[in-house]
Image (tube, rainbow, N blue to C red):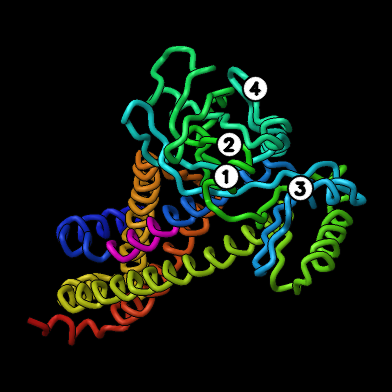
Amino acid sequence: MIFARTIKLALKNIKSNKLRSALTMLGLIIGISSVIALVGLGTGTTSDVTSQVSSLGTDILTVSINSDEKLKLDSIDEMDELSGIDSVAPYASVNATVSKDGTAASSVSVLGVDENYLEIRNYSLSSGRGISFIDTENKSKTCVIGSEISESLLGYSDPIGKTIRIAGDNYTVVGVLEEQGSSMGVNADSMVLIPITAAESISGSSGISSLYIKADNEDSVEFAQLSVENYLKSNLNASSDDITVSTQESMLETMESIQGSLALLIGGIAGISLLVGGIGVMNVMLVSVTERTKEIGIRKSLGATRGNILVQFLIEALVLSLLGGITGILSGIGIGSMAEFFGLTFTNSMNIVIISFGVAVLVGLIFGIFPAYRASRLNPIDALRQD
């Protein structure tokens, strides 16, 4: 009964100072909401990238050559024969305008590829065929286009056999990619694929610096990676710094490392916010003790013990922390949900919610102990003399 009355009195005191109580909770709200929102967005983004990396397949190698000497197209067949390698897909990015009847497509990615590119990248065709070996050999003016390019330049008619202009030349559309959106920063729907030999003619340079390589299986990835590195070093006279051979597993490990560092950074920021919120709780409670000195003296003169006064002020600090924690949770989830409207991915974690809420309540209680103790130690006679 006494405990219930103490809670009621604490809530009454908080309610009588709404603005001050709201400002007290603000630090806790900011700390909790920032933890939930930032960790949720970080986790969601990492999950997206991880799924995109995994979608390439764990048996895929990504090769980048940064030396002055580039790989010749004739060397692709030799690499294809290396131990542990199933297929090789060179590619080259080209700066070229893609248009039809004077209308240019925007945000187009033109890539020179060979016949293995679609299979290694797991791209499917909605109609037509891909770039063939014959296209590469003959430098054919053929192309495979993404669904967005097909719609913007050719409308809704059958695009197969139609011509579009790439870098001023007419190219015949032989295939259309299935709609699949963006992955790893590449939007396949706005992509135009041409034979890699035609791409070299457009750019005016020969030599390959980027490749995708598919290993025989997941177990032979490391062996394939070693074979590729040794081949490139011996044939290009390049050093290890000039050659980058990455596996999907190494990319995933890098993402996990980045996520861990990000979590520590976010935790530090949130910790500072919660510390500031705790100081705010203590400050308001100290002000409350000063304002209610006479009230404390009256209660003590009527028989209230130090424990009663201590519990009353601790309950006030606890209620402020609880309200701040609940509001912070709702705010964090709300911010994360709003971010999804802007194309971001938010993943709410109950563990983060529980931990951040618990820390907020603990901080509030810790910083409420000193004011509560100070109130309980007041001399009733001195308190009654206070104006």
Label 3, secondary structure: give it: strand
The label nearer to you, 4 versus 1, is: 1
Q: Which residue is mark 3?
A: 213
Q: Evaluate if marks 1 and 2 touch, with contact meaning CB atoms under 8 Å apart.
A: yes
In this view, the residue farthest toward the top is: 157
Task: Report helix, strand or loop for mark 4.
Answer: loop
- Could you tell me the amino acid type at mark 4? Arg
Q: Nearer the viewer, residue 54 or 46?
A: 54
Q: Which residue does the image show at 44% across and 59% down from the upper left? A: 35
Q: SS class of the residue under badge 1?
A: helix
Q: Residue furthest left?
A: 387
The earlier-in-sequence mark between 3 and 4 is 4
Q: Which quadrant of the view contains residue 144?
A: top right
Q: Residues within 10 Å of mark 3 (few under 14, many from 20)?
A: many
Residue 138, given in percent of the width and then of the height, sits at 67, 34
Residue 199 is labelled as 1
**How many tags in the picture?**
4
Q: Which mark is residue 194?
A: 2
Q: Magenta stretch?
A: 25-35
Q: Amino acid at mark 2?
A: Ile
Is residue 274 or residue 16 the one in the foreground? 274
Q: Residues within 10 Å of mark 4 (few under 14, many from 20)?
A: some
* Amino acid found under the numbered disc labelled 1: Ala
